[in-house]
Image (spheres, helix red, strand yellow):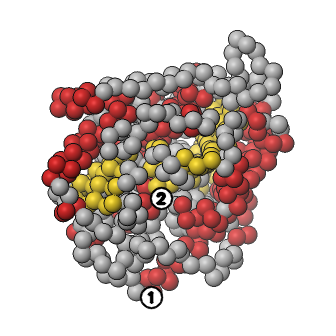
Amino acid sequence: MIRHRRLAAVLCLVAALGVSGCFIQSGKPSGGSEETKAPKKPNVVFILTDDLSWNLVAHMPQVLRMQKEGLTFRNFLVADSLCCTSRATIFTGKYPHSTGVRTNFPPDGGFQVFKAKGNEQASFAPFLEKAGYRTALLGKYMNGYHPNDTQGGTTPYIPPGWTEWYVAGNGYGEYNYKLNENGNLVHYGQKPQDYLTDVLAAKGVDFIKRASGKSQPFFIEISTFAPHGPFVSAPRHAGLFGDLKAPRPASFNEADLRDKPSWLRSRPKLRAPAVSRIDAGFRDRVRMVQAVDEMVGRIRTILKELDRDRDTYVIFGSDNGFHMGEHRLAGGKMTPYDSDIRVPFIVTGPNVPPGHRVEKPAQNTDLAPTFLELAGVRPPPATDGRSLVPFLRGTTPPDWRQSALIEHVKPPPSPQDPDRQDSGPGAPTTYNALRTDELLYVEYADGEREYYDRTRDPHELNNIAGALPEQRRRHLSDLLYALTHCSGANCATAGRSR
């Protein structure tokens, strides 16, 4: 466990707000014959996609079915809309300022920084394995991870806590990649059956079949590279959706950017060729998620066939969103706007109320403590998030957060970075932001500010930061400062303010 420094001023501010936070330690029985000594621990299937925005869900019938049969977090917000930082937060339940992972590559991020700062030991996997779970990770791990890297050992490296490991390095193209399969390096080529999302689906089904025959509970994370660019779909889907266009929300090709921060203000309006490229990219993304959607269906079908659907939670989500045309921006994701930070998260499983919607703000900090509570494990004190289990059982904690934190460090340009489109000139500068049901407040490192009244302006068109009363601005700035320096239960306490 890592100790985090706390500034004295932050301690005073957070202490003034009070302290709270408790976690139920045991999983709830899913029904059937259970030993009274130890309630049966549920299984968990976690399907994590890459760059999957809300506007793709309408084209995913299996995910829509999950919504109908399960619970949807309507305001699930990532702490940073960037692959590596988001995944570090998912694994640990800690904000980026606590994990120390701020970008995709060193010196401020990537696999090496994640590992060097002790985050692998602080991740949920070692705790689950110690609690008796059979664990597996399939697909993507962290930016900068190479499947053939031995990390000083004699075989390809496998992080602690994972019983089984089938992980690629650069799988964005869906073909010609290598998997570290439990310490053995396996190459996949360009044949249709090598399509990575399909390979992960098959391995996921195989793991569930094998794990279901054992007495111990299982946890599997299937982490796709889809629909991250270069938007390569499976051959069977390549000709679909020929007339589809990208959605045109009110923010699409925004008419007036004079109120926006300087990094965005000078963007010209998108012309017809740029809009055509956006439409083509959106079609490719919709095609690409068809294989992901089929995987969701396969996983849920095998669970039903094995009679494990009644004691297994299936969680579907994304590490971050993606904009395509909003605010005159082409493809990308590192802004504080809802297109990038608000992502789908949907859950089915025992006692989950069907067709239910949760409007309270949840964050990717909450996933690790959720997995641990389901396993009957108390989250470490340094966990910044809170368990979502009460929501899965149809209740709302009375002291749940009102404010979510988003914090972003602009990465330096790197030819290795798969997200380099958001690190060059004209990309968002470093910022911290607060998001509630009613507002979005952003402070940039260069001193610029944004404030949107989300009740009247849900598309974040009119920046009215300049009209904020000084007392209100100071309150929001103090709250943002407290959250960007919080740790553990102090984060939950500070997040109750708005």
Looking at this view, name the residue that lies furthest to the bottom: 272
Residue shown at the point (16%, 49%) measured from the top left? 471
Q: Residue 321: which disc?
A: 2
Q: Residues within 10 Å of mark 2 (few under 14, many from 20)?
A: many
Above/below status of 472 relative to 276: above
Dividing the picture into quarters, in which one does residue 370 lie?
Answer: top right
Rendering coords of residue 56 (x, y %): 58, 64
Residue 339 appears in the rendering? yes
Report which residue position mark 1 lands on.
Answer: 272
Number of marks drawn: 2
Mark earlier in primary sequence (2, 1): 1
Residue shown at the point (65%, 66%) measured from the top left? 59
In-front residue for pair 117/148: 117
Give the position of the N terminus as an image quadrant.
top left
Residue shown at the point (46%, 55%) measured from the top left? 342
Above/below status of 182 relative to 438: above
Rendering coords of residue 156 (x, y %): 55, 38
User: What's the amino acid at mark 2?
Assistant: Gly
Real-space Cα distance between discs 2 and 1? Answer: 24 Å
In-front residue for pair 362/328: 362
Q: Is residue 45 left or right of residue 143?
A: right
Residue 198 appears in the rendering? no
